[in-house]
Amino acid sequence: RCEIAGRSNGDDFRDFDAPSRLEFARMSCTKARATCGRRSSLPLFHLRNGRNAKAQTCASLAVKDKATGVEYPLVEYVAGAEQRCLGAGARSKKIAFVGVHVYAVALYVDPTPAAKELGLRQRGGFFEEDASDSMGEALLDGAFNKGLHIVMVRKLDGKAFGDAIVEALTPRLFGADKEAIREISNLFDGKELLKGTEIIVGWRVEGQLEFYVREGNGKVVQAAKEGMVPDLVLEQGAVSRALFSVYLGSDPISADAKSSYVEGGFELLESEIVKRSTRKGGSG
């Protein structure tokens, strides 16, 4: 679950080919109407329900995970370029039979190639059945840069975090690729992940996986933006896909987070449909 807020003046918003500020405003209005119980004009939102619907206000260009209160900028520097946030959700664990939030995690994508690829898939009928899983698959396997931004909301031992990654990745990998997950585990071993610690995982279209780990205050974003050497780089494409499938695959570790990403993917697709329709109308 997340809350999206949109500021109309766009002072801190850099234009992208897809979607434009005007299109984003349209998306905002469409989402607000749908959340209020009014039917959206496009069938792409039929998968939304009350539990996963995003609330909308008009205060700032940010995406807020309602479960944890963590707020992400709509546009952020990930994997070598500015990317668009599709949504955010919480990773929770049961401790003594009580569910607690461990971290918030947002998904970012390079908006222009992502929108175009989603448009191509839509015109090919890719989303006609099992729309939610199909969008998850499209975001996972799409040929565009993407990234995850994790913010810890409670203190956690780095070894425990690394062990959780190994546990999630092991059934998704085979053979020599399993050696790579030990490098991920070693990255966090010996660290104390305090509340507010941020982790950015960038997946470049060439296959590289980049990790940045910093203690809060936006330092992790600044490190990525300034081109600082990542804390870890992996070249195995299979490992990159396996890690992102933990959040976008058919059995995600956070169903609410995936639902948020899927909804954001359909909104990006809607912007591409609007743009394409406008171009067609103008050509006549």
Image (cartoon, rainbow, N blue to C red):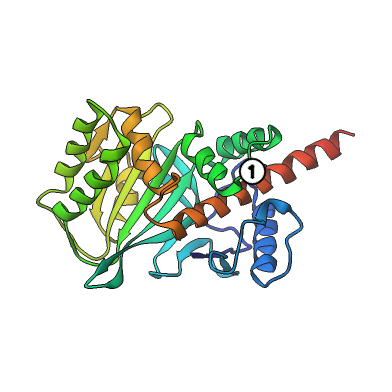
Location of residue 166 by image quarter: top left
* Vertical position of residue 105 compared to residue 53: above or below: above
Looking at the picture, how far across and down is residue 186, in whole percent? 14, 42
Residue appearing at x 46%, y 65% in the figure: 64
Decide which of 149, 74 is in the foreground and name it. Answer: 149
Looking at the picture, how far across and down is residue 183, in whole percent? 18, 37
Decide which of 23, 35 is in the foreground and name it. Answer: 35
Secondary structure at badge 1 equals: loop
Residue bearing the label numbered 1 = 129
* Vertical position of residue 156 compared to residue 264: above or below: below
Looking at the picture, how far across and down is residue 147, in whole percent? 40, 44
Residue appearing at x 17%, y 55% in the figure: 160
Left or right of 135, for residue 231: left
Decide which of 51, 146 is in the foreground and name it. Answer: 51
- Amino acid beneath label 1: Glu
Q: How many marks?
A: 1
Residue appearing at x 40%, y 42% in the figure: 245
Asked if residue 228 shows in the view, the reply is no
Asked if residue 218 shows in the view, the reply is yes
Disc 1: CA contacts within 10 A as few (<14), some (14-19) or many (>=20) = few
- Furthest residue to the right? 284
* Vertical position of residue 166 compared to residue 58: above or below: above
Decide which of 147, 126 is in the foreground and name it. Answer: 126
Left or right of 177, for residue 253: right
Looking at the picture, how far across and down is residue 227, in whole percent? 32, 38
Location of residue 18 by image quarter: top right
Residue appearing at x 73%, y 60% in the figure: 40
Quarter placement of the C terminus: top right
